[in-house]
Image (cartoon, rainbow, N blue to C red):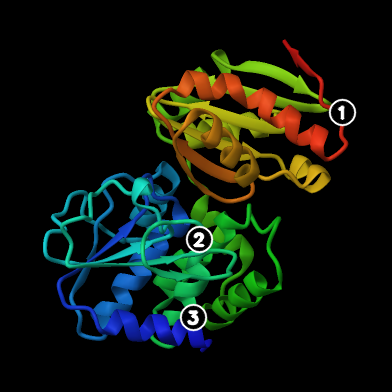
Amino acid sequence: MHQRVRDLRAALLALTPQVLVLPHSRADIDALSSAHGVAYFLNRHGIAARVCAPSVSAPAARLAERLGFVHDSSCDPAGKDIVVVDTSSRSMLDVDVSSARSVLSVDHHEGGDLPGFVFDAPATAAVVHELVAGIADCKLLSFLAAGIVADTAGLYVAGADALSTLSSIFSRCSLRVSDVLDLMDSEPPLYERIARLRALERMRVYAVGEYVLVTSRVSSFEGSSAWLLVQAGADLAFVGSKDRISARLSPRFLRRTGITLQAIFSRLTADVGGTWGGHAAAAGMHTEDVDVALRAIPTIVSLLLEQRGFPHSIRAY
């Protein structure tokens, strides 16, 4: 066990029950699986803990249901010890934790405002796997494996550390990559499919240099809709709802340009205000004016391409 994980283990075991484990808003598979992993660790060591996730992404909710993991949709943090998972930013939480007795974050993204542990890891689930590796059952390990696969874009950006962790899980539980992918593959519900089609109907298409950038608006399922737009041919997809933008990049764009969503959202939040969190190819942003932010994105991408010496003219279609 790495020293940082030992330190995390000691910090968790010093908490007072009942502990609430909170993933970030609209928790993805990595966040939700990691939250259940932390709660499992605490409960196995006699510290009562439960997962509180007021909003969960559709893929994470489907996978949790399939594996039999349940969580609370509401909770009262007042006077409790809180573990925040897969973010270290207050703005990315559904719950105001200011009344909590203590807050400890476990994350693999830099730049948050909560105290805790930030790891250089491909997914928070990889850290939690090391925490629970000696005690977890295969149902939880499968959930964590799915978190790693999801956060490495289906293993497309997985490095040796991610593959090593997955190899450990696969060996212990007699799994294959296809088993995890099958767990994650399920038919989206009716309203998610409608939202995806609405995103196609409302999209605005730009050519920025040689890359296709698409923006759109939906009322829900913006992350799933952005994923569909990339599948349909976009190199960059940004889909807004009431106060949030979810984005996805194609592997082609990321590989050829080196421009990440961290770079785009950092510039965008500086220009229009808001907060963001996420990864190189999948991220989200909260902002008070989604339409202004969506209109600003083509110009920001053009400027980033120009800085790297790529063609960067903008054409709207």
* Sooner in the amino-acid sequence: mark 1 or mark 2: 2
Q: Position of residue 115 (x, y in %)?
A: 36, 67
Left of 190 or right of it: where is 69?
left
Q: Nearer the viewer, residue 184 or 218?
A: 218
> Mark 2 to mark 3: distance in Å?
14 Å
> Mark 3 to mark 1: distance in Å?
44 Å
Q: Report the residue marked by disc 3.
A: 130
> Mark 1 to mark 2: distance in Å?
36 Å
Relative height, residue 136 to residue 309 (above, below): below
Q: Position of residue 281 (x, y in %)?
A: 63, 46
Quarter of the figure with residue 35? bottom left
Secondary structure under tag 2 reads helix
Quadrant holding the C terminus = top right
Q: Position of residue 232 (x, y in %)?
A: 68, 28
Relative height, residue 111 to residue 302 (above, below): below
Q: Residues within 10 Å of mark 2 (few under 14, many from 20)?
A: many
* Sooner in the amino-acid sequence: mark 3 or mark 1: 3
- Residue depicted at 50% across the width and 88% down the height: 3
* Sooner in the amino-acid sequence: mark 2 or mark 3: 3
- Residue depicted at 70% across the width and 40% down the height: 250
Quarter of the figure with residue 283? top right
Q: Are marks 3 and 1 in contact (CB under 8 Å)?
A: no
Q: Nearer the viewer, residue 129 or 272?
A: 272
Q: Report the residue marked by disc 1.
A: 311
Left of 317 or right of it: where is 266?
left
Q: Nearer the viewer, residue 113 or 24?
A: 113
